[in-house]
Amino acid sequence: MRLSNKDFDAFQRATLELHDASGDLETFNGCLAETLLKVIPTEMFSRFDFTVSPQMGKLKMVKCFDPHDCLSHALLDWMERLFPTHPFTEYFGRSGDPTALKMSDFYNLTEFRRTEIHESFYRPLGVNRHLGLAVPSMGGTIIGLNLVGRGKDFTERDRLILNLLRPHIALANRNAERGTVRRLSPGRALAAYELTPRETEIATWVVQGKSNPEIAIILNANVRTIEKHMERILEKLGVENRATAAVLLANGNGNGH
């Protein structure tokens, strides 16, 4: 389908707003929620930053942005525990296709209401529709953007706009992550973090956006070994996730621009 002139104007305004707000993550996240809810009206928006194992069997949540304060600890625990069985995750695991997905791609409303995921997650939120998009972040982290609501399903127009916004969201988010790290951390040489030679080697690949499984293949190492090294790297850098680590390491190598 093609966007109408009105929708195309809304898309253009959205891209400008996202890039204008990319100075730091706090500003960007607030703008992201506001902008998406203007261009695709619905009740709730949330952002999850996570890493996933190569077999999609394990998810580790590293950040959650919930501007509507709708997600209880119990719901977040459910998402982290049962996320591998979510239809969006299973589809991405099979196909690698990052396109925006609707819950109605997998179930009609009656079928959906009979599922465990509806009973455990969506029903407590009081919603019955979901439009989601996976966006790559720095250091191999994935951003899950979620628009959920009640009433009529999302349209193909909504899906198209979200897909068109995907590269702009990825770029603006990357710039916001860099801006946040630069503001919070004075420039330090990589040697100042006292990484071992192996950790430095792994860190170099993290800066290039490689995931733990990809680094394991490159270095002919066990994935769990790489994960252990990453834990120590994060500890030495004093950061919570690999996206922030990637920016910090890039700046330390003089590659942050």
Image (cartoon, rainbow, N blue to C red):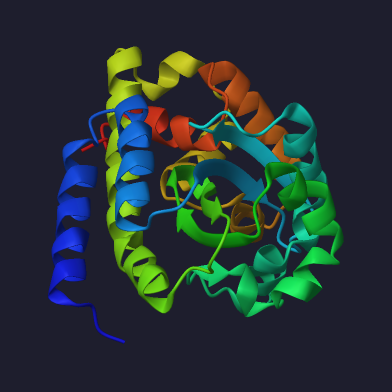
At horizontal 39% and vertical 54% (from top left) the residue drawn is 41
Residue at the farthest front position: 151
Front one among 110 and 221: 110
Q: Quadrant of residue 197?
A: top right
Measuring from the top left, give residue 184's x and y in whole percent. 34, 14
Q: Which quarter of the image is occupied by the N terminus?
A: bottom left
Residue lying at 32% horizontally and 67% vertically, measured from the top left: 161
Depth check: give the residue in front, 25 or 52. Answer: 25
Extreme-bottom residue of the structure: 1
Q: Position of residue 79 (x, y in %)?
A: 74, 45
Vertical arrangement, residue 217 with respect to residue 49, above or below: below
Task: Classify residue 96 as left or right of residue 117.
Answer: left
Q: Is residue 222 visible?
A: no
Q: Is residue 245 above or below residue 89?
A: above
**Which quadrant would the C terminus be assigned to in this image?**
top left
Relative horizontal placement of residue 98, taking residue 3 as reference (left or right): right
In the figure, is residue 82 to the left or right of 191?
Answer: right
Instruction: Name the spot of residue 224 as percent of width and height, x first.
Output: 78, 45
Where residue 59 appears, x then y in whole percent?
Answer: 73, 47
**What residue is rendered at 56% in x and 42% in y?**
48
Which residue is at 28% across, 17% downward? 183
**Which of the 4 image quadrants contains residue 69?**
top right
